Amino acid sequence: MLVLAAVFFHHMTAQELSQIQKGKVQSLANFLNQSSKTYIMNYDLSALEEFVQVGMKDQDIDHIQFMDSLGVPYTETAPKETNEGALKYSEEILSPDGTLLGVLNITYNEKASTAALQRNLQVVLFCFVSIIVLLCLIIYFVSMRLSKPLISITKDLAYVSEAAQENSQLVLQGAKDIANGVEKQRSALDSNVSAMSEIREMVERTNENVLTCLDVSKGTLALSSDGSKNMDKMAHSVVLIENSNKQLQEINEIIRKISDYTKVIHDIVFQTKLLSLNASIEAERAGEHGRGFAVVAQEVGQLALMSGQASQDIDKLLKDSMVTVGQIVQDTELRVKESKALSEQTQVSFSNISNKIEGLAQEIDSFSQAFNQQMKGLIQVNSAMESMTGIVNNNHQIANETSEVSMSYKEQSLKLKQVTETIEDLIKGNRQS
């Protein structure tokens, strides 16, 4: 592990130093690029040579060379001796208008960085070796000091592992019993939930039937109210018929009076006949002079005869009318009395029916409210049953998890016993050796 750590540290340090070296070369290249533009444009090669000599004083820079756009060198300074690990950096030199003036080539190495890295690696390895030696000494002294307590600890661990194994067995059996009981509870709850769902559906259907009965009772109440109104109208019509019967009685009285007047007409007709007879007798006595008077008397007699016949006809019609009107009046009075009594009874019956239907509607409304309360209660009970089902399922899951934990606990106790025996063997073996 220490060797791997040292290699990793060496690799990370090498990368970091390489990045630093590359950044330094880029900074130098930027400086030379900006400073050399004027000299290249003026073709001042001596100034470029001075740049090259100053830059190569850095031990990490092996060679600096300025070249024109065709690849012909501006500078002739010889490079330092380089090894195979030398690195190169190139950058174009552009005029302000973007024209290519030349190319800057820099060759550099990482000798200083590598040397520093090797020194750091040596220091790290020395530290690692010192730590290993120190740890070995500490482990030796600690093992010598802790062998006796470790033996005592292994005995305690063996006792604890045996007790843990027994407890895990008890916990496992209890978890199985709990799981069985929870399974039975879940089955019972499932049955109760199904029964509650069926009861809820039955209550919903009963509530719908009650609401239907309530609508029917309201419709019947409306019909009974309409019937009561119609009976009121019928009672009013009976009153009108009764009034018409009174008018018929008045008409009958008028006919009776007319009949009395016809008696007077009979008397007048009789007197007219007598007068006509007397006139005829007197006309016969008068002879020739009474002929005209005899004709008048005859005509008067004929008129009296016709009047008498008409009077008899009128009298007969009046009597027939009186009989008919009287019969109509009697029948109408009887029917009016019967209709009036029947309408009053029917009106009372409709009123009683309306009151009973109204009471029935109130009772049905009360039943509907009670069913709604029962429905709310059933919903709450169903929700509680579902919650209890969730709780039972959680308990079942907890029981299963407890069983799994107890099994794991048992396995860990067995592993602890094995580890304890292994530690004890190791300690005893060290002491025997």
Image (cartoon, grey):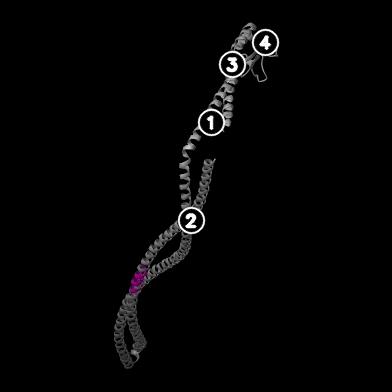
Q: Indicate whether 28 appears above or below 47.
A: below
- For the residue marked with disc 1, what is the amino acid? Ile
**Left or right: where does residue 47 sit relative to residue 193?**
right
Overall secondary structure of the magenta stretch? helix
> In the rendered image, which residue does mark 2 sit on?
169
- For the residue marked with disc 2, what is the amino acid? Gln
Mark 4 packing: few (<14 Cα in 10 Å), some, or many (20+)?
A: few
Q: Are marks 2 and 1 in contact (CB under 8 Å)?
A: no
- For the residue marked with disc 3, what is the amino acid? Asn
Which image quadrant is residue 50 in? Answer: top right
Q: CA distance from mark 2 to mark 3?
A: 78 Å
Residue 113 rendering spot, x and y as whole percentages:
59, 20
Residue 340 rendering spot, x and y as whole percentages:
32, 78
Q: Quadrant of the N terminus?
A: top right
- The secondary element bearing badge 1 is classed as helix
Q: Quadrant of the C terminus?
A: top right
> In the rendered image, which residue does mark 3 sit on?
30
Which residue does the image show at 58% across and 31% down from the upper left?
4
